[in-house]
Image (cartoon, rainbow, N blue to C red):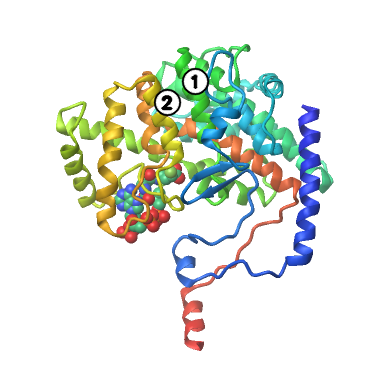
Amino acid sequence: MEMLKQKFKAQADKLGEEIKAILKEHGDTVIGQTTLAQVYQGMRGMTALITETSLLDAQDGIRFRRHSIDELRDKLPKANGGSEPLPEGLFYLMLVGEIPTQEEVENLTSILQRRSHVPSYVFETMSALPKETHPMTMFVVGVMALQGESTFAKKYAEGMNKKEYWAATFEDTLDLIARLPHIAAYVYRRKYKQGKALQPDGLLDWAGNFAHMLGYDDDQFKELMRLYMVIHADHEGGNVSAHTTHLVGSALSDPYLSYAAGMNGLAGPLHGLANQEVIKWIFEMQEQLQTKEPTAEQIKEYVEKTLSEGKVVPGYGHAVLRKTDPRFTAQMDFGKKHMSDDPLVNTVWRIYETVPPILQSLGKVKNPWPNVDAHSGALLVHYGMVEYEYYTVLFAVSRALGVLSSLCWDRALSMPLERPKSVTTAAVKRWLNKE
Ligand code: FCX
């Protein structure tokens, strides 16, 4: 652990110096123009944030420290006998910018195991909620109940020197990532499996153990969880969950508070909740059409009906991407390898052939291609995880790897309080009248 921490600190100090030099020489360099439309319309395309962990290209999709998802599947260490990357390896990569060795990943796995204990009051707090509560709400309540454990909050209250912020954030990050699978698995077992929680298996990796605690001991499901935890981890800094975590963290709210805030954003249907919406939408289509495998023509009619009711087609479109999401493609590849004859998975693929031309024909949808959420549910259903309201919790556990490693960078680079300027429309009118 100390080695990883020191390595991170050395990288952060180096980059901090480089940033200082860049700003000294180029601090006044203009990097773009902002239009009024951007300000009113969700700040699309406006560069306003620094995030070191990953970068999104509109055509190629996400790259984590310059590595594409295909490269990660190839280069990151695997579990014994497995072929999907271990998410611990991605976390390491996002933190220090290097692909770790098998041994470094195994060390990280044991660090996380040692830090994974969740105090019983956290489970009791979640149990106090009615069973009907949405799993994301239960999950965030669990995280908030754990906030009293924050090293950052304790040390801040004791008068921590600002030079130590990064180290306290680093400690909280590891503790929180280690504990999240327990909180998430508890939500699932309580809500859907009569509250029968399962003991962790200390011999398993982070994602494998999460699968086990959920109650899925099939080796293929563990592989799916490793892939799932890797591809959902980060999508540069401007998406709602990453930006919220960063923004709240900029007030020096501790990692528990910051991450919980970000996850409330992930719980929105235009963001992480889209994965539950996709499968719900497909189940409803199957029910209405009375068939498990609708034809392309039937799908087309159903999509047109969805659009005519003023709804979006879930799992399609993206604020930045303009091609099929490589996270979708990676899941399709997994499906082809392990379940090519599954009717639901085949329906997802038929939807992929059918939806883009329809969205294109509307003339306003900037990206008619599928995003990560279009595929994930069908893979989970294949292994028996049909409780789609739960899916965003899986996304949230994975997203912790990205947003919390970014938070470590924020504190290590002494990122300041974020506070952009806002104006009223009356003020805009005054500007326009002047011109
Ligand atoms: N179905 C129908 N209409 C769509 C659409 C879709 N999948 N995607 C975009 N549009 C519509 C928008 O609703 C908007 O219509 P309006 O002008 O009448 O309001 C118009 O096309 C232009 O939107 P666009 O600029 O292409 O997209 P935005 O950047 O505004 O929004 C999201 C991007 C992702 C929010 C949008 O494509 C959407 O609602 N998709 C469905 C929900 C979804 O899959 N979300 C998950 C996204 C992601 F992967 C994640 O963050 O998890």
Q: Position of residue 225 (x, y in %)?
A: 49, 24
| Residue drawn at 80 percent across, 29 percent down | 3
The residue tagged with tag 1: helix, strand or loop? helix
Question: Would you call the spot at circle 1 few (<14 residues within 10 Å), some (14-19), or many (20 or more)?
Answer: many
The answer to whether the residues at label 2 and label 1 have Cβ atoms under 8 Å apart is yes
Q: Position of residue 67 (x, y in %)?
A: 59, 39
Residue 396 visible in the current orientation: no
**Label for residue 223?**
1
Identify residue type, mark 1. Glu
| Residue drawn at 46 percent across, 37 percent down | 327
Q: Which one is closest to the eye, mark 2 or mark 1?
A: 2
**Label for residue 267?**
none
Q: Position of residue 334 (x, y in %)?
A: 42, 26
Residue 100 visible in the current orientation: yes
Seen from the viewer's position, the closer of residues 179 and 289 is: 289
Q: Position of residue 409 (x, y in %)?
A: 70, 45
